[in-house]
Amino acid sequence: MKTLLNKHTLFLFTVPAFVLYTIFFISPMFNGLYYSLTDWDGFSKDYDFVGLSNFIEVMKDEQIRNSLTFTTRYTVLLVFFTVIISLFLALLLNSKIRLRTFFRSVYFFPAVLSLLTVGLIFNQIFYQVLPFMGKGLNIEFLSVNILASPTLAQFGILSVNIWQGVSIPTILFIAALQSVPAELIEAAKIDGATAVQRFRNVVIPYLIPVMNIIIIITLKNGLTLFDYVKAMTDGGPGRATESIGILIYNYAFEELKFSYGITVSIVLFFIMGGISIIQLKWSSKFEVK
């Protein structure tokens, strides 16, 4: 009787979370699916049911293809550099160095800042501070605002995203490194394995579960890129940095194609889900069983 009561009590604790999840996630998701089959502009009470015409139009939209190409390229670079840099920092901060607790705090500090705030700050750095320094030091590369260049603007945004984005992955990697059994590393040393061999064959398998989480989170952040672009370039110059998130925003709130914007977001959701499933299936082969 007591066990049954405890189970009911524990279940009651899950009810508020379930209700909030239903209200703020499940319900909007089904509403979005419904409105994607209409021509609703987001404001009027009257709209028509258009079936799958929005999805068909998405497949033909060249602007979406260009935006998706930029977003995909950006996401690949973001995932690659975030994983590599955060793993390097984690290895460094997990070693026996002086003031490592202090450095862990310093590297985590960017994670507590708002994305939009960081974007606005770096927008001024790229627009005023760096050109001023470049002209003063007679460095031609720094003398221009790279956000005004269609070729370089994406790398300016990417550098800011990486600067802020490595904080949490670094902490996660540090936690994962501390879970690697010390006796396995010692056994590998006794067997004559080099540092590279120990890292590849002993450490990496224990990092795979955390690496999966980091890749999926970074993948989501890259594919839904919005705040940095909105604050720094607003999709320019010449739509060179128009991410799929910015495009959805423009369709919904600038062009009042709300249902079409929802349709694009649903397509993006399935792309993210498909990539995540493939990545999890592939990386699970290397996990420690």
Image: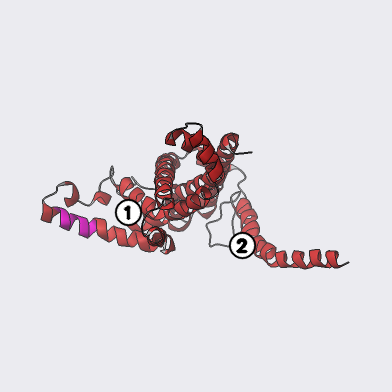
> Is residue 21 at all visible to an observer of this figure?
yes
Dot 2 crowding, Cα within 10 Å, few <14, some 14–19, many 20+: few
Q: Please tell me whether residue 194 is drawn above or below residue 23 in the rendered image.
A: above
User: How far apart, in angstroms, are the residues tagged by discs 2 and 1?
Assistant: 30 Å
Q: Which dot marks residue 269? A: none
Please give the name of the residue rendered at 59% of the width and 38% of the height, measured from the top-left corner.
Answer: 287
Number of marks in picture: 2
Residue 216, given in percent of the width and then of the height, sits at 52, 46
Residue type at tag 2: Phe
Point out the residue furthest to the front here.
190
Report the residue at 75% width, 67% height from top: 12
Quarter occupied by residue 2: bottom right
Magenta span of residues:
127-134
The secondary element bearing badge 1 is classed as loop
The residue under label 2 is: 24
Q: Nearer the viewer, residue 209 or 165?
A: 209
Upstream in sequence: badge 2 or badge 1: 2
Residue 98 is situated, as x and y percent measured from the top left of the image, at 36, 57
Picture quadrant where residue 106 is located: bottom left
Residues at marks 2 and 1 touching, judged by CB atoms closer than 8 Å: no
Residue 222 placement (x, y as % from top left) = 45, 48
Residue 248 is at least partly visible in this image: no
* Residue in view at x 44 percent, y 44 percent: 83
**Is residue 197 placed above or below 100 in the rendered structure?**
above
Q: Residue furthest right?
A: 1
Q: Secondary structure at mark 2?
A: helix
Q: Nearer the viewer, residue 80 or 66?
A: 80
Q: Amino acid at mark 1?
A: Thr
> Residue 265: where, in percent of width, then height?
53, 49
Instruction: Give the quarter of the figure containing the C terminus.
Output: top right
Q: Along the horizontal axis of the image, is 133 left or right of 156?
A: left
Residue corresponding to mark 1: 233
